[in-house]
Image (cartoon, grey):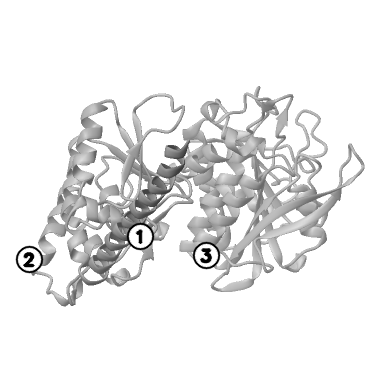
Amino acid sequence: MVCGGFLFPIINTMNINTMKKTGIFLIIIIAILGIIVFFFPEALYSNAFGQKVLMKIEGEQVAEFYYKENQIGKDTIYMKGIIYANTLEDIKLVLKENPEITTMVMEYVPGSIDDEVNLLASQEIRKYKINTYIPENGMVASGGTDMFLAGKKRAVHPTAKLGVHSWSGGNQVALDFPRDHEEHEKYLSYYTEMNIPLDFYWYTLEAAPANDIHWMTTEEIEKYNVVTTNPYSQLLEIQKTLASDAFKGRATGNNKEAQNLITNYFNRIGLYKLTDNYSIPFTFIDEDTKKEREGINIVGYVKGKINPDKYIVIGAHYDHIGIINDTIYNGADDNASGTSALLFLANYFSKNKPKHSIVFAAFDAEELGLHGSKAFVDKPYIPLKDIKLNINFDMISRNPANEIYVVGTYPFPQFKSTIATVAKTSSLNVSYGHDNPNDKIKDYWMHSSDNAPFFEKGIPNITFSEEDHPGYHKATDDYDVTNHDFYIDVVKLINAFILSIDEEFPKSKS
């Protein structure tokens, strides 16, 4: 007992002395690192370990390659972080150990701190013919953009961001060197190898200085062959996203994911707002519960260059019927197809300015009684008298017979000749009808979709739609069973119709 009581103070003293020494040692290490980081950062930048330390200090991470938890299949690898000294060896190892990889999804790759390694690693990606993809809300910039360009096939989700800028070294920036200077050669050789137009390189140098970033527009992405997919792949990609399980069937009151996608897209392409926000809430009485509910219309517009105070309103409902008995009703045709077409055309006309202003309205609560479009005309943010035409899309991607109906030419015959003219260049079977109240054979559709509130206000309107199919309001209305070529042809027809109408509005025959 006496011995034990005597030893404890000695041990405690030793522990305290050890802790003091350890603390002093840590302080010295931290101080040394601080001195190196502040006075000799190039020493850390010169090796993989030092780069990891610097990235940690800056709140970033170096690039890593990984599979998702519970991922089915190993053909898709994911990437996140800044490209650094060890990325070449990392990518070699990943591809060697996983020869089944065909696609690399770049979720967040804001740049590179080792350009030499970046170009070599990118060449490795092309060597193995790996495809690259920037997913929903993904972000790739600077050296990450160069790596993205190594993809054999390249695609960018509509909500993703792709950034470029110039480069600098020492006290000089890229544009200080003449175009034939050897400093440009490694980049020009790389873009040539990747089959990217050399104009892209010079464009990046002027797009933003080295300490800033320029986010590429859709037009720029297409102009410089940054993606290998055709323009209509974006149409299909948006439809697929809206009709995915993650969007939970887009029922009114439970469709925030769809609202965010549409709002972000409008913002990205630079549409004007009718109010302070793209999102315009409204209330309605639910016919089943008799209680008040809220819906959200999402509205933006492109200003006309000649007749800015005259409007074409293009509308499509983005809501569907949601989840029923634990089953998700994705509504790929009804009406992810119409919503995606709306966004695709909004993008087109944001780059190809029309004569008249064009409003793009994604309506909510159509499935519950056309409440979104009713709210739009009952509380208009533009004078109804200035709306020259409403065009409505509702179910336009699923018809094995290649038939699309143009509804509204019976009450508004002035538009039929325009449709007939543009239809001559289409492979579609363009049919007319469902708009004559005296027709006892075809259902009357003038009150069946979001065209109805416009029709009831006396506003000319044309609807593009198809006959009901076996998947109508069923859980089988999925993206995989839509007719992609048919859908693209319908959107091409609609685009041609809008261009023709905008160029010269037909006079009413009434």
Query: Residue placed at 46% from the left, 39% from the top?
Result: 2
Residue toward you, 350 or 265 = 265
Residue toward you, 13 or 126 = 13
Residue toward you, 80 or 300 = 80
Q: Residue furthest front?
A: 2
Q: Tag 2 or tag 1, which sits nearer the N-term?
A: 1
Q: Is residue 194 visible?
A: yes
Vertical side of 204 occupied by 218: above or below = above
Q: Alpha-carbon neighbours of circle 1 within 10 Å: few (<14), some, or many (≥20)?
A: few
Side of 223 where 364 appears, left or right: right
Question: Which amino acid lies under the numbered mark 3 shown in the image of this protein?
Answer: Gly
Side of 174 where 286 appears, left or right: right
Q: Tag 3 or tag 2, which sits nearer the N-term?
A: 2
Question: Which amino acid lies under the numbered mark 1 shown in the image of this protein?
Answer: Ile
Q: Is residue 111 visible?
A: no
- Distance of mark 3 from mark 1, alpha carbons? 36 Å
Are discs 2 and 3 less than 8 Å apart at CB?
Answer: no
- The residue wearing badge 3 is 270
Which of the image's four quarters has the C terminus? bottom right
Q: Nearer the viewer, mark 1 or mark 2?
A: 1
Q: Alpha-carbon neighbours of circle 2 within 10 Å: few (<14), some, or many (≥20)?
A: few
Percent of width and height locating residue 436: 78, 40
Residue toward you, 286 or 183 = 183
Classify mark 3: helix, strand or loop.
loop
- The residue wearing badge 1 is 57
Percent of width and height locating residue 306: 56, 74
- The residue wearing badge 2 is 182
Dot label at residue 48: none
Question: Which amino acid lies under the numbered mark 2 shown in the image of this protein?
Answer: Glu
Classify mark 1: helix, strand or loop.
helix
Percent of width and height locating residue 164: 32, 62
Q: Tag 1 or tag 3, which sits nearer the N-term?
A: 1
